[in-house]
Image: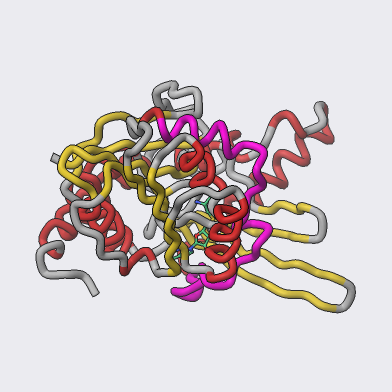
Amino acid sequence: MVPDRIRPILARVLAGSKALSRAVERGPHLMSGSENTWNSTMMPTGRRGQELRDAERRSSARAVHRGEGMTCSDEWFQDYDDKFALKGDETGEAEARFIKRVLHLRKGRSVLDIPCGAGRIAFHLARAGCKVTGVDLTPSYVRKARSRFRRESLPGKFLCRDMREIDFHNEFHAAFNWQGSFGIFSDEENLEVLSRYATALRPGGRVLIDQPNREYILRHFRATRETGNVRSETVWNRKTERIITSFSETRGRKSRRWHLSMRFYTPAQFRDLFRAAGLEVEAMYGGLDARLYDRGSRRIHVVGRKA
Ligand SMILES: C[S@@+](CC[C@H](N)C(=O)[O-])C[C@H]1O[C@@H](n2cnc3c(N)ncnc32)[C@H](O)[C@@H]1O
């Protein structure tokens, strides 16, 4: 699956990433009993608070160690749930404004939105006059995007395709991968995907990749969560540098489980990855107000440019 031209570059990136990850692991955020594993705003104070913090620390540490051996199906991303994949419209406009700004998009410029979901970002970019092409694996989301564009009489092209197989060449002013959709494949395939975005760009074009900030997540690690009737268990696998989350939902007597596995990159690893894909990192942002990334940012938005 990995083309020959990428193989030597990939070997370099992976070798580099091991050294980097060892450096990160020496940091304070790993779950060896540090106070970073609990959310102080939710804990009672006093002895009861201390007991809860200790229990949380123990369970987080166990979760991290369990993560060493944990794997999940390679194609897990095919069966995750609509309510987790499709974000509502509330923040779409602000997100699109940020994307437009950092990718230097203007009226008439072409932009590739992969994965586009049901087109909640593409919609605002098209309204601003950009020529949008959206790609997503899920047919029902692509249908939703198409019908929304038809209803609003907006131009836009939507394709149902696996992002590992896109084959555009020198076509777009910009491309982006938004909202927790980068890092979902193997390391080799993640690089392959980024290389395909780069190939799709015209010279001088820009790509934007968004991820939750690994540093932030590990500092605020929570091994278990309950949201309504969905319970999730999360583990960090320090060898593969992946976070694996198992969800289980119970409705009456029915229950179902699904998983999510994502490779998280440090800023330095992102730089290496971008370079290997033929892109130079131009900036790393840490929020929609375009503030620069720092270790406390909740997300990392990396912008790279094709030579
Ligand atoms: C969390 S959603 C994000 C969608 C959109 N970027 C947004 O901000 O709303 C993840 C999307 O990735 C799509 N997806 C998952 N695997 C994919 C693949 N292999 N190729 C293309 N799209 C994929 C899903 O169908 C889903 O729409």
Q: Identify the residue at horizontal 82%, vertical 27% (top origin).
A: 46
Residue at the far front in the pictured view: 153
Please state the extent of the stretch shown in magenta in the rendering: 71-100
Q: In the rendering, at what x and y percent does residue 281 appear?
A: 24, 35
Q: In the rendering, at what x and y percent does residue 41 appear?
A: 73, 29
Q: How is the image coloured?
A: secondary structure
Q: Is residue 185 visible?
A: yes
Q: In the rendering, at what x and y percent does residue 119 appear?
A: 53, 52
**Which quarter of the image is occupied by the N terminus?**
bottom left
Up the image or down, 243 lies above or below 203; here it is below
- Residue 89 belongs to the span the image colors magenta: yes
- Asked which quadrant contains residue 249, the reply is bottom right
Q: Is residue 39 left or right of residue 306?
A: right
Q: Identify the residue at horizontal 71%, vertical 39% (top origin).
A: 53
- Residue 208 belongs to the span the image colors magenta: no
Q: Identify the residue at horizontal 71%, vertical 52% (top origin).
A: 225
Q: Is residue 166 left or right of residue 245?
A: left
Q: Identify the residue at horizontal 39%, vertical 64% (top origin).
A: 185
Front residue of 42 and 267: 267
- Asked which quadrant contains residue 33, the reply is top right
Q: In the rendering, at what x and y percent does residue 67 appear?
A: 51, 62
**Which quarter of the image is occupied by the C terminus?**
top left
Question: How many dots with numbers?
Answer: 0
Q: Is residue 31 visible?
A: no
Up the image or down, 53 lies above or below 3; here it is above
Front residue of 298 and 202: 202
